[in-house]
Image (spheres, rainbow, N blue to C red):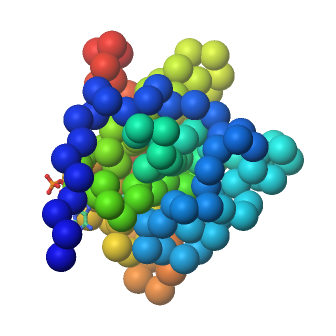
Amino acid sequence: MSAQPVLKLEDLSKPKILDENDDVKGFSCSNKDIDDFIQKEAFMFQEQCLGITYVFNYRSKLIGFATLCMGHLNKEKMKSEDRLPKHIGSYPSLLIGGLAVSNDYKRNGIGTFICDFCFDRAVKLSKILGCRFLVVDAIDSAIEFYDQYGFTLAPKQEKQKQKLMFLDITKRKNEDGV
Ligand SMILES: CC(C)(COP(=O)(O)OP(=O)(O)OC[C@H]1O[C@@H](n2cnc3c(N)ncnc32)[C@H](O)[C@@H]1OP(=O)(O)O)[C@@H](O)C(=O)NCCC(=O)NCCS
């Protein structure tokens, strides 16, 4: 097995919005649906205002991405102790519609770095419109990763293919300490 490249997070390019010049064809995270999405659909999603994809490059190579869109968190899907003491049925949220790191660069902290970026976007949005949670429909193999980051797994989802997880942005400090 070949050794994984060593990467310093500070060497990553600043995240940027996907455009037609980005080479997405070679991206692989070993999940076919996610690879197909970034290779074939992400740009079209963007053009149709369905999701903005932020790409993370290292030495001009795409090594990770996150697709963000507006979302909501239905309070009925949460444990009662996690609900807010407010009379609203669902909470405004930022949805991570897709997130992945390419195979060669996993376990270097890049996924966490991309989550930090998403979290920071949610905090920024919360200053200009209602946005209380960061939410994701996680595939089983990613649950531990999101759990490690601080997301809570919603209950009673054993039969679901993807599992709703959420993070209250007021309960986790961002880089500005807000
Ligand atoms: C899930 C994914 C984004 C994680 O990216 P990453 O860059 O490897 O994550 P990090 O290096 O920041 O990992 C942070 C912590 O998460 C946990 N973690 C990450 N990957 C894990 C895995 N496969 N199994 C168990 N725990 C994992 C570990 O605790 C890890 O810390 P450690 O490396 O010190 O043990 C990446 O594996 C991936 O792209 N997977 C395929 C696509 C996918 O599942 N996307 C999510 C769709 S919902």
Residue 33 placement (x, y as % from top left): 58, 74
Residue 118 visible from this viewpoint: no
User: Residue at horizontal 29%, vertical 27%?
Assistant: 10
What residue appears at the point 31 percent right and 30 percent down from the top-left corner? 11
x 38%, y 75%: residue: 140
Front residue of 14 and 157: 14
Side (left or right) of 87 relative to 4: right
Quadrant for ligand 1?
A: bottom left
In this rendering, position of residue 87 left or right of residue 64: right
Foreground residue among 173 and 109: 109
Residue found at the far right of this picture: 48
- Seen in the picture, residue 176 relative to 94 is either above or below; the reply is above
Q: Where the N terminus falls, by quadrant?
A: bottom left
Q: How many marks?
A: 0
Q: In the picture, residue 46 is in which quadrant?
A: top right
Q: Quadrant of residue 80?
A: bottom left
44 or 137: which is nearer to us?
44
Q: Quadrant of the C terminus?
A: top left
Residue 157 lies, in percent from the top left, at 44, 76
In percent of width and height, residue 81 lies at: 33, 50
Q: Residue at x 31, y 55 (%)?
A: 105
Asked if one can make out residue 175 in the rendered structure from this viewpoint, the answer is: yes
Above or below, 169 relative to 125: below
Residue 116, above or below 126: below
Q: Is residue 1 left or right of residue 58?
A: left
Relative height, residue 132 to residue 173 (above, below): below
Residue 90 rendering spot, x and y as whole percentages: 61, 47
Residues 73 and 108: in front is: 108
